[in-house]
Amino acid sequence: VTSQDRHQVVVIGTGFGGLFATKGLRREPVAVTIIGRTPYHLFQPLLYQVSTGILSVGEVAPTVREVLRRQRNAEALVGNVTAIDLIERTVTSRAAGLITVTHYDTLIAAAGAGQSYFGNDDFADFAPGMKSIDDALRLRARIFGAFELAELEVDESERRSRLTFVIIGGGPTGVEMSGQLAELSRHSLNNNFRTIDPTSSRVVLVEAGATLLASYGPKLSAHTKRALERSGVDVRLNTAVVGVDADGVDLRLTDGSTDRILAKTKVWAAGVTASSLGGLLAAQSPAKVNRSGQVLVESDCTLPGHPEVFVIGDLMALDGLPGLAQVAIQSGEFAAAQIARRLQGKRVRAGFRYRDKGQLATIARFKAIGIVGPFKLSGTPAWLLWLGVHLIYLVGFRNRVTVIAHWAVTFVSGARSERTAPSDEFYQD
Amino acid sequence: VTSQDRHQVVVIGTGFGGLFATKGLRREPVAVTIIGRTPYHLFQPLLYQVSTGILSVGEVAPTVREVLRRQRNAEALVGNVTAIDLIERTVTSRAAGLITVTHYDTLIAAAGAGQSYFGNDDFADFAPGMKSIDDALRLRARIFGAFELAELEVDESERRSRLTFVIIGGGPTGVEMSGQLAELSRHSLNNNFRTIDPTSSRVVLVEAGATLLASYGPKLSAHTKRALERSGVDVRLNTAVVGVDADGVDLRLTDGSTDRILAKTKVWAAGVTASSLGGLLAAQSPAKVNRSGQVLVESDCTLPGHPEVFVIGDLMALDGLPGLAQVAIQSGEFAAAQIARRLQGKRVRAGFRYRDKGQLATIARFKAIGIVGPFKLSGTPAWLLWLGVHLIYLVGFRNRVTVIAHWAVTFVSGARSERTAPSDEFYQD
């Protein structure tokens, strides 16, 4: 078969789902085109380590085409998908004014989820999210810049506001981010300042619900809360954020009372919403989207009425599966395997079965929590497991080499060696 | 002596000059305040490796206050110096609206040099310079982005223009940058693309003068030209850039003829101009500035009429010393030593003596040129020397660890593991 005659697979999205679907097709007689809004694959679970100065951008975001360089049947394209035509079977994408139309025989929609401000898009300027390299470097400039400016500040209440960090959202990202910020101010900035005392910084984690890390169950949730509090994090449960501006956040508690925290630096780790491509697919098919914008798929991850279209990862709504890397990876591999079975004339699987491999979240250096099968772990054993699992799943041998070097630096000395970010704009004027 | 009574030294600038002056004062009974426009010390000679995907930003730009954390008599402040008062002996600086006035007994002005577009500031948008982390990441996004967009381009001449890189200026930065770009397109992007052939990229190095690396003498200059040409660089000597726009550059040769190169990506490595603080100092003293904005100093690096003000590094004009890291380092150490001698009541030195330790420039992996004492080196021996010297001068043990990891990745495999930069803006629309 020549490449023209080959079965054409288009994959939209370069996250875990899209990448593992593409890799799953490496030995199949197909031509895969993977289209991403950015040229890189983002290892999102470690993005908070970029914001807090531990890892470099290349380590968590290798270029997709470099990752796929040996997979000759795959081509990576950068582009924002602007249209999908389910009749003509084409995907239209656009990057820097260049429009590309790509034909598919099978489509894998793995466009994932973006930050959601629950309709309050004006919060975004003041509380960047945690979804891209641009976000992470913006936050890195703000976090380390907050301490720099506090050192210059003569007004005591302004200085306190510069040394207050509010993290909105008590899921894994919010917990890991607040744990890191506490460690940063308690340990990593040792001896760095002459006027301020970084250990006097306030880190406030605000969660609208009644627990942190709800999916870990009440015992580990309570453990996490205690561990964060021991690290110096002020954990506010049952507290909704109703306003975010340059100077602080406005809160409303479940009892109806209100509060305001003065804080120059805010991080949004609260809501996600599926890519708008879900709506684009639903509009042309019998499919429906849920409130988060995810597409309600058939049990085999296909779009209702369109067996040639798979919807996977965070864009897919199936059996209430959570928005985890593992769900994306496994649904991506499943879609690839189904395509292979179809092309080989084999019997396809009736439905996707998610195999829960467990969950892990770090709270601080040497401290993590996890669920692995029937076991609930915490403390150093969980942290060591976290370390191993993340090294295994990091994409690319070369990245692992430098990540180990950076982790050695941080975990041995407590210091951060990747504190610099573009900052012309931050300090300007 | 309490810190209030201590002799106050203010250092302006966190480059090699400012940092080594500060470090030179670490055992003296002084209080040093070092003020920089950015919070980081930039190892400028390796900045081109950030742009071309070899090193991370933290590796070439450690935070000044982290570098100085153990030097208890030094305080680092971020701020753009807006005024110097030689009568009141104060320095006024500003960052994000916060104004700081710092008193000095001795001032060390080490504000260095910035990019000069020789009056054509409109070139800056199209041809970023090589002077800051912001510059380097902007260039990284453009360089790797050029290949990404070329892969999408259907128009043949537009594609050629996207795969053409023009480097303006044949000094060390221009030579190293064009050598790297040649290597990047010839080797590092192997197997990355399916449509374009990155090895067909054009790298053009444009120099207005008759030789590359003029300070290395005719033999090594000619060697460099040949080596670059063998790597595939199109070297254009005696060629001035008279126009830069989004689509290309306009050239004028010394014979009066003109030419135009269509190229989307341009890098400005041509001119430097001293910080405007030179003019600020000259306006209040008998000192004069030269055409490059450098202050003509006394033989002991002090400002004429103001023995309490040292002007060092790139901001200083003295005996025609070149704008090299070594000149900045040695003049910084000299200023520190003079201050120590004065405070100890010892006899000060009459003048600064520069000790030429030689020069080194890389052309490609395993290829460099250098002058060390009476020896002129080239090829692998020069490259190994370059490697050693840069590791020694890199600031901080931790950075050296990860730089070695990144260099191992690049020099062994040829690949680049730091290709990702903020790119939302680049691909937008």
Image: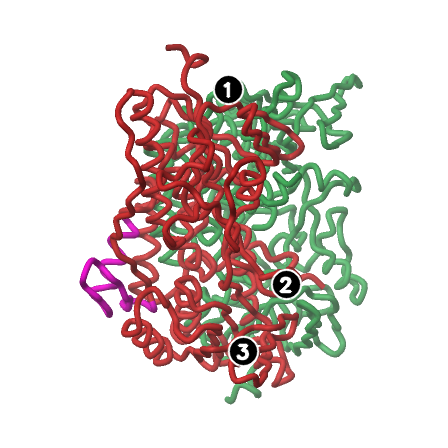
Chain colours: A green, B red
x, y percentage for residue B414?
35, 67
Mark seen at residue A31: 3
What secondary structure is found at the residue carrying circle 1? loop
Is B184 on the left-hand or right-hand side of A351? left
Mark seen at residue A195: 1
Is B263 on the left-hand or right-hand side of B23? right
User: What is the span of residues highlighted in magenta in the rendered image?
Assistant: B363-391
x, y percentage for residue A281?
75, 64
Q: Is residue A178 above or below residue A287?
A: above
1 vs 2, front mark: 2
2 vs 3, front mark: 2
**Are the residues flagged by discs 3 and 1 in contact, CB closer than 8 Å?**
no
* Quadrant of res A298: bottom right
3 vs 1, front mark: 1
Split into 4 quadrants, where in the image is the N terminus of chain B?
top left
* Quadrant of res B209: bottom left
x, y percentage for residue A207?
66, 28
Q: Around disc 1, counting alpha carbons within 10 Å, would you say few (fewer than 14), some (14 to 19), or many (20 or more)?
A: few
* Both marks 1 and 2 on one chain: no
The chain identifier of the residue carrying mark 1 reads: A
**Are the residues flagged by discs 1 and 2 in contact, CB closer than 8 Å?**
no
Whether residue B427 appears in this view of the structure is yes
What secondary structure is found at the residue carrying circle 2? loop
Spatial distance from mark 2 to mark 3, Cα to Cα?
A: 48 Å
The chain identifier of the residue carrying mark 3 reads: A
